[in-house]
Amino acid sequence: MVNGEYREHNVTVALKLFTEGDEQFKETNNGFKASQNIVSQKVSNKEVLEALVEEGVIDEIQGWSIKVLTYGAGEIVGIYLTKKNEDPVDVSDYFEYDVFFALQEYKEKLKENNQGDESYEETFKILGTGYLDLFIGDFSTDTWSIVKLAARESYKEDGDDFESEAVTKKASFEKTVGEAYEDDEPFGVIEGSIKAGEGKKTDLGNDD
C-alpha cells in the first residue's frame, strides 16, 4: 500500500473582474453625448483576504497566506489560511471546486534487483476541465477552467523494509472565465487563473 502524504501549496490568485462603469451623460447645444465604459479590477490574494476579513474570518491580511492542502497523488483536501505562530484556518467553505473531465499522461517504471526487491515509480499529469469558484459574503463566481495537475507515486522494497510515497506536485485552474455575482445577481465577467505551486510536506491535514 502506498502511503499518501499531506502537502501544502502556496496559492496565487490572478483574476480580473470586468464590470460596467458609470454612465456619462452631457447635454449639448443640439442634443447630448452619452457613454459607458467597461472597467476592470484585479482579484488577487489581497482582495480575497480582505473579503475574508470583512467576513470576520481573520482580523487583518498581514502575514496570512492562502494554501491548498492535498493528500496523496492528486486529491485536493481543502483550502486553508496560514500565518506564522497562528493556528491554520480552514476556509474550504468559501470555495467550491471540481473536475468534470480529464486526460492523463503518465510514465512508470518498475525494477527488480537480484534479491527480488522491487522499486516502482509513476509520474503523471492531468489535463482537464473544471472550476474553482469563490463564495465570500455577497460575492460569488460561476466559472469554467482548464485544470492541470501533476503527481507522483513510488515505492521501494529492501528485504522486509518497505518505503512508499504518493504526492501531489502542482495544481492549477487556468484560462478561467465566467460570471461574477452579487446577491445572486450577475454583475461582471471573471477571467484569469488560480494556481497552487510546488507543494511541501505538512502536518496541516493531520487534525482532519
Image (cartoon, helix red, strand yellow):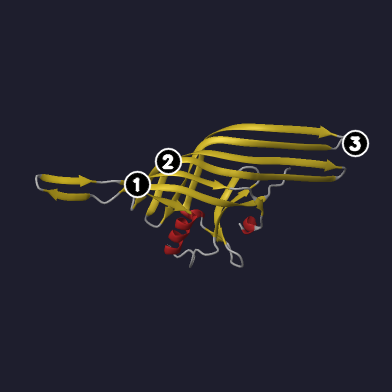
Asked if residue 25 is positioned above or below residue 127 in the image, the reply reads below
**Residue for badge 3:** 115
How far, Cα to Cα, is label 2 from label 3? Answer: 54 Å
Residue 136's image quarter?
Answer: bottom left
Q: Are marks 3 and 1 in contact (CB under 8 Å)?
A: no
Residue type, label 2: Val
Q: Is residue 186 visible?
A: no
Neighbours of disc 2 within 10 Å: few (<14), some (14-19), many (20+): many
**Residue for badge 2:** 177
Residue type, label 3: Gln
Q: How many marks?
A: 3
Query: Looking at the image, which is closer to me, 201 or 93?
Result: 201
Sequence-wise, the earlier of marks 3 and 1 is 3
Residue drawn at the location 56% of the way across and 35% of the way down: 127
Neighbours of disc 1 within 10 Å: few (<14), some (14-19), many (20+): some
Residue 30's image quarter?
Answer: top left
Neighbours of disc 3 within 10 Å: few (<14), some (14-19), many (20+): few
Sequence-wise, the earlier of marks 1 and 2 is 2
**Picture disc at residue 188:** 1
Query: Looking at the image, which is closer to me, 38 or 12?
Result: 38
Please state the horizontal and vertical placement of residue 145, each as a whole percent of the image. Answer: 48, 39
In this rendering, position of residue 37 left or right of residue 195: left
Residue drawn at the location 42% of the way across and 63% of the way down: 54
Sequence-wise, the earlier of marks 2 and 3 is 3
Residue type, label 1: Gly
- Secondary element at tag 3: loop
How far, Cα to Cα, is label 3 from label 1? Answer: 64 Å
